[in-house]
Amino acid sequence: MKTIIHIKGPLNVGKDIILKFYPDLRLLLREIREMGWSYSFSEVYGKASVIIDLDKVNFTLEYHPPEIEELEEKGTYEIRAEVGYEPPAVLRVEAIDKFEIYISSKNAWRCVRINPLEKTITYIKDVLWNGIRLDGKSPRKLSEAREVYQIVKFFLQKGYRMKNEYVLEKYKELVELFEKTYTFTLTLELTVHNEELVPGWNDLIRELGEFFYKKGLLMSIKENNKHKHFLFRKPLP
């Protein structure tokens, strides 16, 4: 028996489908190609209607317990459908809610990822420790690593921002490699005066990083292992 079901979640669709919902994206994609780079879509989420032959579908029921830190919460159930070797027929894609784009240069494969809807850079590959080449090897010349830096600068000039402190740290490493920088140390002594307003450690670092970034500064934390997080054990987790 064939029936129509509605899917909401990850979708594997082509560029033409995404551009139907976001036609203004064509300009950015053309600029990427003009720079000599290539791109590929990832993390595509949306809504679609497909035709399923229920007589040929194998369903499995899975239970997902709550996270360790949320033991008092209830778990969730998930139904999975194995439809066989042939993909289901897609009637229509109803919406594309979000997606990201990987950028590759001549020598650096999928080295930068962006979210054009949020105008954020969500990933920068480590050019010194992780292989950036298509063959999985590290750059043979510094000029190959510079390609990653050039891609990041391209999007920063378009008003993109770093998604989090981890991406910001990778960008800082690129700046130290390819720009003449002036670095100075600023020591902060913080005292808790209102526990209700104090964020967690990770949120605090992220907010400080965003504050300094808006001022044209890149921040990194130098931790003393002997006194690591000493001031932030209480009330910060």
Image (cartoon, rainbow, N blue to C red):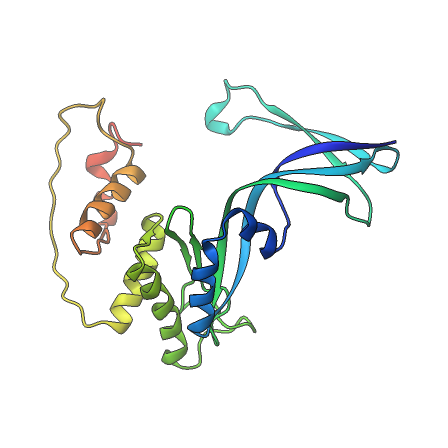
Horizontally, residue 30 falls left or right of residue 202, namely right
| Residue pictured at 26% horizontal, 33% vertical | 233
Which corner quadrant holds the C terminus? top left
Q: Residue at x 51, y 29 (%)?
A: 67
Q: Quadrant of the N terminus?
A: top right
- Expressed as whole percent of the image width and height from the top left, the position of residue 225 reads 25, 48
132 in relation to 213, above or below = below
Relative horizontal placement of residue 140, taking residue 228 as reference (left or right): right
| Quarter location, residue 150 | bottom left
Residue at image position (30%, 59%) is 156
> Where residue 86 sits in the image (x, y, percent)?
81, 49
Q: 150 left or right of 29? A: left
Identify which residue, 172 or 7, lies in the foreground: 7
Q: Position of residue 186 (x, y in %)?
A: 11, 52
Position of residue 210 relative to residue 32, above or below, is above
Give the camera-side residue of 198 and 228: 198
Q: 82 or 10, which lies in front?
A: 10
